[in-house]
């Protein structure tokens, strides 16, 4: 993203920093469990993965798509070098990264959540108008002990963001 503003950083920021994040978006960005499973419940159907050309070596860029909505989240996954052949297979797997990784490696742990408010784009997200739309995203590490440690950034695309922004707390 061209301009990223850190709204929240796990273990550093206080809860009050989250007040600027709409409640529905805050819920999705803060979940510890499977984003894929949550999206399936939102869309009442399976998530499909649209593989996109990766912007960096040893990375994976995908759109997570819902039935009747299309792309709702864009996710960039990076694994630090050296990358094993098994890790490379995970990056090339056409299913969501969490299920692909947990099937091959076992339980996953999320660490270091950071929530960002972004304007402008560096990655190509066709439906986002440059410098006009705000995108909410999160970055975290997904860890399987002893390795790998993947860094994942997920952007909530405008189609889903519009739905989540309608959620209000009393």
Image (tube, grey):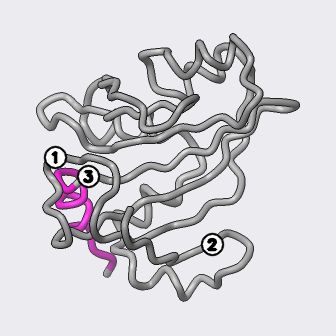
Mark linked to residue 9: 2
Quarter that holds the C terminus = bottom left
Q: Position of residue 143 (x, y in %)?
A: 74, 39
- Residue 11: image x %, image y %? 74, 73
Residue sitting farthest toward the bottom:
16
Helix, strand or loop under label 1: loop
Number of other residues with Cα within 10 Å of mark 1, as a class: few under 14, some 14 to 19, many 20 or more:
few
Where residue 86 appears, as percent x and y from the top left, is: 69, 12
Which disc number belongs to residue 83?
Answer: none
Task: Classify 16 as above or below 109.
Answer: below
Viewer-side label of 2, 1: 1
Quarter of the image for residue 65 reads top left
Q: In percent of the image, x 88 and y 31: which residue is there? A: 146
Q: In which quadrant will I find the N terminus?
A: bottom left
**121 lies above or below 94:** below
Residue 126 is tagged as 1
Q: CA distance from mark 2 to mark 1?
A: 28 Å
Viewer-closest of 58 and 20 = 58
- Residue 112 appears left or right of 47: right
Please check the rendered image and state whether residue 71 is part of the magenta-colored stretch, yes or no: no
What kind of element bears circle 2? strand
Q: Is residue 68 left or right of residue 82?
A: left
- Identify the residue at the far front of this view: 57
Q: Earlier in the sequence, mark 3 or mark 1?
A: 1
Q: Which residue is mark 3?
A: 157
In this orientation, which residue lies closer to the viewer: 117 or 24?
117
Q: Does residue 162 show up magenta in the picture? A: yes
């Amino acid at each position: 993203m061209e301009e990223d503003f850190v709204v929240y950083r796990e273990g550093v920021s206080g809860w009050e920093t989250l007040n600027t994040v709409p409640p529905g978006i805050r819920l999705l960005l803060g979940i510890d469990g499977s984003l894929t499973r949550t999206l399936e419940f939102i869309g009442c159907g399976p998530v499909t993965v649209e593989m996109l050309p990766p912007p960096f070596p040893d990375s994976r860029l995908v759109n997570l798509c819902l039935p009747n909505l299309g792309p709702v989240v864009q996710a960039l996954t990076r694994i630090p070098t050296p990358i094993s052949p098994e890790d490379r297979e995970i990056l090339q797997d056409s299913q969501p990264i969490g299920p692909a990784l947990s099937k091959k490696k076992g339980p996953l742990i999320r660490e270091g959540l950071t929530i960002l408010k972004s304007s402008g784009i560096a990655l190509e997200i066709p439906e986002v108008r440059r410098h006009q739309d705000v995108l909410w995203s999160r970055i975290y590490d997904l860890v399987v002990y002893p390795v790998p440690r993947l860094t994942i950034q997920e952007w909530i695309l405008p189609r889903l963001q519009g739905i989540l922004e309608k959620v209000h707390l009393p």
